[in-house]
Image: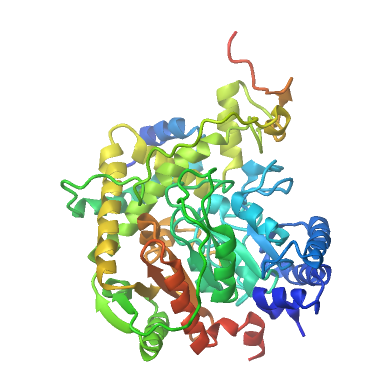
Amino acid sequence: MKITDEMIDYIGILARLQLDESEKESAKNEMEKIINYMDVLNEVDTTGIEAMSHAFPVKNVFREDEVRPSVDRELITLNAPKKKDGCFQVPKTVE
Amino acid sequence: MDWMNMSALEVGKKIKAKEIGVEEVTKAALDRIAEKDKDVNAFITVCADEAMAQAKKVQKGIDEGTLTSPLAGVPMAVKDNMCTKGILTTCASKILTGFKPFYSSTAVNRLEEAGAVILGKLNMDEFAMGSTSETSFYGPVVNPWGSQRSPGGSSGGSAAAVAAGEAFYTLGSDTGGSIRQPASFCGVTGLKPTYGSVSRYGLIAYASSLDQIGPLGKNVEDVAEVLSIISGHDPKDSTSVPSGAIQTQLTGDIKGKRIGIPKEYFGDGLQADVKERVLAAAKKLEEMGAIVEEFSMPETDYAIPAYYIIACAEASSNLSRFDGVKYGYAAPEYKDLTDLYYKSRSQGFGMEVKRRIMIGAFVLSSGYYDAYYKKALQVKAVIKQSFDRAFETFDCILSPTAPTTALKLGESLSDPLKMYLGDIYTVSVNLAGLPSLVVPCGFDKEGLPVGLQLTGKAFTESQLLNIGYAFQQATDYHLHLPETKKEA
């Protein structure tokens, strides 16, 4: 498969990453090499095999629904680059 | 006598017997770090003041009889992708600049409760993505066995710190070989436990379905002791298995144990003297009463592509939390919220991390999901079945850990695909969720360590460790130190 400029730009949007022109060029070449190598998986016959997301069958892990104190806001926002009134502060999103 | 060359349990015993004080040995470790780490760069953060304060507290606990663990008071260090309360936690990334978690990971908490003294946080590949510990924002780790050599990765700092005698044992994490390959390159013992044996709570996620915390140390006994402290159910990690801590009986008796050698692991691309040392180790185990047989695992070639698709897919999702809003680095200038995300991430992540996030975004994207991600999950099932079949016959699978001994620094950075291919013997273990132990089994012609990989059925750590213990009772490779090499 060929990784085109359009594809790299689209992946950049999905990943929220901006690459400069030289980064983009090398990402294109390397990704193409890596993705083409991954195509070797087509050799494996997986007809009728279910996709396995976890190695062990773990599902629906429940705990007792007990009331417990939540973490202090002060602690949650401790590392925030910008905060205000106990909240994370972000640039204005609605005019 | 140089304490720093002793094993963790030996030091623990001397502390108990009041031959050494906890503060004294902590000071010795900090001095050793000050002396060695300018060359090794195993540490991102050394917490000298906190360690000395903890040492004092732990000594009191030991004296009063409240701290009884054989490892109480023994100084150790933690890979920098595990949260440590109030201590800088960076994942070796610029994007976590200044991040001081308000809680500690469960593994760290359990060690502290047992009286561990934490010396600091260990260098690694950025977000554990790499096999050489060179993608760190804080500079590469250097293998104590050779100034031009990589210690492996991603837990390169964890392995190098043990090899250089800077910490008696360390915690690492293993997503595709990140404990085992550095253990092999640095001549130390490392265990990747069964998925779910050790809580991942507080481990900053790379690929959640594959990540597992484990110990590195000078020998199997140390590693088994650490495992008994950090393993066991944790309600804070829903993938942690509902069983108690793993206690190991090390008898050294391996008579009748069936050991399988997958012939595909010994083909092209395996360094000749690595092959020789690993097969010699198999011979040794046979002499000790094990039954060693060759068998076939034809799926070996598909493990790397399946692993990288799954790991990158999970990484692209996990690393979306780094946005310049909640913690860490935020771009100083931006137009709006989306621009803050783009700029913080683009300026904060290194190239290998960006590459894996993009591969992950691609394999999950509409139109490619079935061909790559779903296919990889099916191949994962095929690989798991292949191991299940092997364990019907064998108690343990013996193999090399990596195709080579420690690589030259800089060698892998220019060709990411080549670096990925070096993970051939380790990644399938993570896909199948299995426990796997690496013990030193000799040296190549340049005197660099070779590691033997022993992989077991899920939750058979105890048996695996016993085989490793038997091997170390019969050999002395684990006793060699980088310094003795220089003198030789």
Instruction: Classify residue B20 as left or right of residue B12.
Output: right
Q: Nearer the viewer, residue A19 or A94?
A: A94
Q: Nearer the viewer, residue A4 or A69?
A: A69
> Residue A60: percent from the left, percent from the top?
39, 37
Image quadrant where one finds the C terminus of chain A: top right
Image quadrant where one finds the N terminus of chain A: top left
> Residue B246: percent from the left, percent from the top?
50, 63
Instruction: Classify residue B258 as left or right of residue B452.
Output: left
> Residue A38: percent from the left, percent from the top?
30, 51
What residue lies at 23% left-to-right and 71% top-to-bottom?
Answer: B296
What residue lies at 45% left-to-right and 37% top-to-bottom?
Answer: A62
- Looking at the image, residue B94 lies above or below residue A82: below
- Looking at the image, residue B287 lies above or below residue B328: below
Picture quadrant of residue B12: bottom right
Instruction: Classify residue B90 as left or right of residue B54.
Output: left
What residue lies at 65% left-to-right and 58% top-to-bottom?
Answer: B111
Q: Nearer the viewer, residue B250 or A79?
A: B250
- Looking at the image, residue B444 lies above or below residue B421: below
